[in-house]
Image (cartoon, helix red, strand yellow):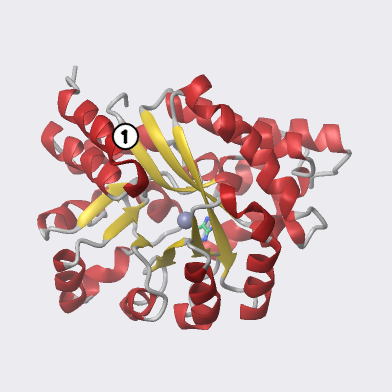
Amino acid sequence: MHLPKAELHLHIEGTLEPELAFALARRNGVQLPYADTEELRTAYLFEDLQSFLDLYYALMAVLRTEEDFEELADAYLARAAAQGVRHAEIFFDPQAHTARGVPIGTVVEGLGRALDRSEEKHGISTQLIMCFLRDQSAESALLTLEAAKPYLHRISAVGLDSAEVGHPPAKFREVYEAAAALGLRKVAHAGEEGPPEYIREALDVLGVERIDHGLRCMEDPELVKRLVADRVPLTLCPLSNVRLRAIDTLEDHPLRAMMAAGLLCTVNSDDPAYFGGYVGDTFHAVREALGLDQEQLRTLARNSFEAAFLDHDEERRARYLSEVEAYAFD
Ligand code: ES4
Ligand code: ZN
């Protein structure tokens, strides 16, 4: 739980806890189709990625003002700090908000207010990763990048998320090229529900530096070899994989086999308000389910800092890595 770690796969909208959702609904005069938090929680039994996304997008209706986004991010950072997080690279989905009439500036400035205080208040350094919704058009992604131009000083990378199957990475070649030209780094969700081919495409066509999930690479030994040789980080989210039925139980998760294969694995929480735990909870759960020993947990923590976008501040990375090495398990 307190092992120092970086969180590299975290959707800020996926940290919206039922209690905060109802508080914001009341404040903003938004009617939720659930009587109370208890009834809302019964909606958290998902069949697959899409059934989760339907609820995830619906609940965002309560997020309207800068203050809402600030509160959301501050609540996440407080929980993350209590679970050993020292550095967080946080996804957000601008199109999910602009589609509801909330300007991208409201989202970025609101999140930014919380992030600006994060180091001092929570001891967590932060970055923002702007994700394009892959089930929207390539044109919409280009317009989103354009709309983000006044806020690029707050954004370090672009990502690709939402419903994967049927929306291969190549659809977003142009916007990724434009993002890179603006100095943004690149990641993409691939191989969560989609085939190993999407992982290849994310690397070859989009030029991503990390793969978010990447779970299904294990079906393709040649791809695994390549990911190992190139040290491409995978941001795995084991609790998410169970809740969205990519795997049956946590005991079936291939994390152990993936580490043994030499893959650069990290463990992350994805949408912790929906999937049953924050990143410390996730480390705890995989330790119990897979019987990882202390050195394997330390390796996962070390990997998280090695995979972090800290190239502009290697001193900080080295400090975090020495915290990992010095950590005494109790
Ligand atoms: C997501 Cl688990 C997952 N997969 C793809 N897109 C997402 N957006 C939020 N959570
Ligand atoms: Zn995700």
Residue at screen point 25% across, 48% down: 251
Q: Secondary structure at mark 1?
A: helix
Mark 1: give few (<14), some (14-19) or many (20+) Cα within 10 Å.
some
Residue type of the residue flagged with mark 1: Arg
Q: Nearer the viewer, residue 118 or 234?
A: 118
Above or below residue 60? Residue 195 is below
Q: In the rendered image, which quarter is residue 209 located in?
A: bottom left
Read off the residue under disc 1. 316
Q: Nearer the viewer, residue 85 or 285?
A: 85
Percent across and percent down for residue 322 are 20, 29
Q: In the rendered image, which quarter is residue 41 located in?
A: top right
Above or below residue 159? Residue 78 is above
Percent across and percent down for residue 293 are 13, 35
Q: Quadrant of the C terminus?
A: top left
Residue at screen point 58% across, 50% down: 153
Q: Quadrant of the N terminus?
A: top left
Residue 111: in sight, yes or no? yes
Q: In the shown orientation, is residue 218 left or right of residue 35?
A: left
Above or below residue 217? Residue 277 is above
Percent across and percent down for residue 30 are 85, 43
Residue 166: in sight, yes or no? no
Q: In the shown orientation, is residue 57 left or right of residue 202?
A: right
Residue at screen point 27% across, 27% down: 3
